[in-house]
Amino acid sequence: MAGRLIYLIGPSGSGKDSLLDAARPRLAERGCRIVRRVITRSAEAVGEAAQGVSPEQFAQMDAQGAFALSWHANGLSYGIPKAIDDWLAAGDDVLVNGSRAHLAQTRERYPDVLVLLLTVDQAVLRQRLIARGRESLADIEKRLARNARFTAELIAGHGEGLFVLENSGPLAHTVERLLCCLDHGHTTCA
């Protein structure tokens, strides 16, 4: 039996990396692999433990078919290694830190994808983005407005196969909800 692709999406600052780090041991116990993305951001950059490559290296890898999925966002390029297809075929579940804007293409290639939307209260998200110090306050406000619109549209347009995980509270609670969703196919777990 083939494994399932689990596509985690959410706005920058929603806590995707923190959730993946916290859930990693328990996901591994379930035979779920967490994919290490390839990003055109230096390996020293703060954030997820991705493979940092230059834009030229990324373009070469993409041209050689190294990625199952790839996209461009916020001035960076992102790639999901083609190895996920082998893992899925071997029956492993595979969790990908994906892109909301690339969801339609992902669903086209992987029609049975399980989509997890990580959300967070706007006030909490604002504080997290300010604490990161990567953007100006004006840019943060634009990002928050864009996120609110995008999230509403996403929920309205992709309800089936889309599970919402709220991450404004304790991370341990979000991990439990994530595991419940994966084990039982719903997010009604308390």
Image (cartoon, rainbow, N blue to C red):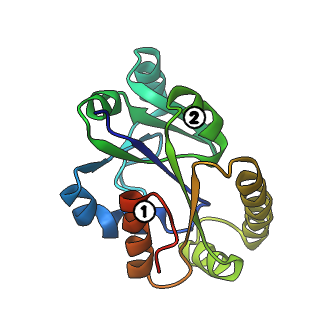
The location of residue 60, given as percent across then percent down, is 43, 19
Kindly identify the residue that appears in the image at 69 percent across and 47 percent down: 158
Q: Give the crowd class for mark 2: few <14, some 14-19, many >=20 residues within 10 Å.
A: some
Is residue 63 positioned above or below 132 on the image? above
92 displayed left or right of 163: left
Q: Quadrant of residue 48?
A: bottom left
Residue 65, given in percent of the width and then of the height, sits at: 41, 17
Q: Amino acid at mark 2?
A: Arg
Q: Is residue 114 above or below residue 132?
A: above
Disc 1 element: helix
Marks 1 and 2, the one that precedes in the sequence = 1
Give coordinates of residue 50: x percent, y percent: 37, 48
Question: What number is the disc on residue 17?
Answer: 1
Q: Quadrant of residue 108?
A: top right
Q: CA distance from mark 1 to mark 2?
A: 22 Å
Reading the image, the residue beneath label 2 is 107
Q: Is residue 69 left or right of residue 120?
A: left
The residue drawn where x is 46% and y is 15% is 63
Please state which of residues 4 and 140 is positioned toward the viewer in this rendering.
Answer: 4
In the rendered image, is residue 35 in sight? no
**Image coordinates for residue 90, horizontal then vertical, percent:** 23, 31
Circle 2 SS class: helix
